[in-house]
């Protein structure tokens, strides 16, 4: 198994980034929705801290993933079954990355504008002043970006199913 991506297949590191992010996100999104439904308590604070720590880890992971992608471009070899297909695929991937950053950065900014100090794993940081209007605005971004993520991931999976069963081009072999 190769570490680097080839023309036709992702390397082991890109595969690990992809599947690790997938498994974290399928837990983190419902966990977020569960969290907001909880009454204020010690347990809620603890769960929120876990949500934040996992979220900040996803931010770092996606950053490393993009740095890796910059130095080791994704496979370029892909069959086109209709015009614009490659563009649609690339747009979907770009929006998925954008969505992950929007979710994590808006979550971070919401907490910082609440006037709280955050644990960024390697350091701790907080703003001097709070601003609840901005905190609420970033929280709205946090919520809507999550809905957008769900829509984009559904499209992404639908595309894989169509590739597999209709185009029969073994697209899953690229990433598994
Ligand atoms: C949270 C869910 C998921 C996210 C956020 C996600 C994100 C991504 C991203 C960003 C890429 C592009 C990688 C790159 O070149 O930089 C990608 C590629 C790919 N993903 Fe996913 N993915 C998810 C779930 C899945 C699932 C469940 C499947 C399989 C059923 C899948 C199959 C693939 C395949 C086959 C590719 C390669 C596509 C190609 O290069 O043409 N993904 N994914
Ligand atoms: C992959 C990353 C993340 C995902 C998928 C995610 C997802 C979610 C979801 C779905 C909600 C429920 C929204 C609602 O319906 O009201 C939520 C709430 C929340 N998220 Fe995230 N989140 C992520 C990262 C973060 C980060 C990095 C932070 C802060 C540093 C954060 C802070 C919060 C807070 C504080 C709430 C609850 C707000 C409240 O009830 O007061 N999240 N998250």
Image (tube, grey):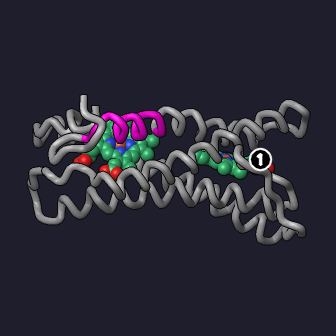
106 is higher (above) or lower (below) than 118: below
For the residue pair 74 and 38, the one nearer the viewer reads as 74
Residue drawn at point x = 17 percent, y = 65 percent: 84
Q: How many marks?
A: 1
Give x and y (percent) for residue 171: 19, 39
Give x and y (percent) for residue 35: 74, 39
Q: Quadrant of residue 27?
A: top right
Give x and y (percent) for residue 119: 77, 47
Q: Quadrant of residue 88?
A: bottom left
Q: Quick check: 121 left or right of 175? A: right
Asked whether residue 13 is drawn in magenta, I would say yes
123 is higher (above) or lower (below) than 139: above
Determine the secondary structure under disc 1.
strand
Q: Which residue is mark 1?
A: 119
> Dot 1, how many residues are within 10 Å of its Cα: few (below 14), some (14-19), or many (20+)?
some
Q: Magenta: predominant secondary structure element? A: helix
Q: Considering the image in quadrants, where does the C terminus appear?
A: top left
Q: Quick check: 14 left or right of 57? A: left
Give x and y (percent) for residue 127: 83, 65
Residue drawn at point x = 45 percent, y = 56 percent: 97
31 is higher (above) or lower (below) than 111: above
Q: Considering the image in quadrants, where does the N terminus appear?
A: top left
Residue range (magenta):
10-21
Q: Is residue 115 visible?
A: yes
Residue drawn at point x = 11 percent, y = 37 percent: 168
Q: Quadrant of residue 44?
A: top right
Residue drawn at point x = 45 percent, y = 37 percent: 22
Q: Is residue 154 visible?
A: no
For the residue pair 64 and 44, the one nearer the viewer reads as 64
């Amino acid at each position: 198994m190769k570490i680097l991506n080839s023309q036709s297949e992702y390397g082991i590191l890109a595969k690990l980034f992809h599947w690790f992010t997938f498994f974290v996100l399928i837990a983190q999104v419902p966990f977020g929705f569960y969290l907001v439904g909880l009454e204020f308590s010690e347990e809620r604070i603890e769960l929120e801290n876990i949500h934040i720590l996992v979220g900040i880890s996803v931010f770092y992971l996606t950053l490393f993933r993009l740095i890796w992608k910059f130095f080791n471009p994704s496979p370029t070899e892909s069959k086109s079954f209709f015009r614009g297909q490659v563009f649609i695929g690339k747009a979907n991937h770009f929006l998925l990355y954008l969505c992950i950053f929007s979710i994590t950065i808006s979550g971070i900014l919401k907490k910082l504008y609440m006037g709280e100090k955050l644990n960024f794993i390697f350091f701790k940081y907080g703003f001097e002043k709070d601003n609840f209007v901005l905190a609420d605005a970033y929280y709205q971004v946090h919520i809507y970006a999550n809905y957008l993520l769900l829509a984009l991931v559904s499209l992404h999976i639908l595309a894989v199913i169509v590739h597999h069963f209709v185009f029969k081009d073994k697209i899953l072999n690229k990433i598994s």
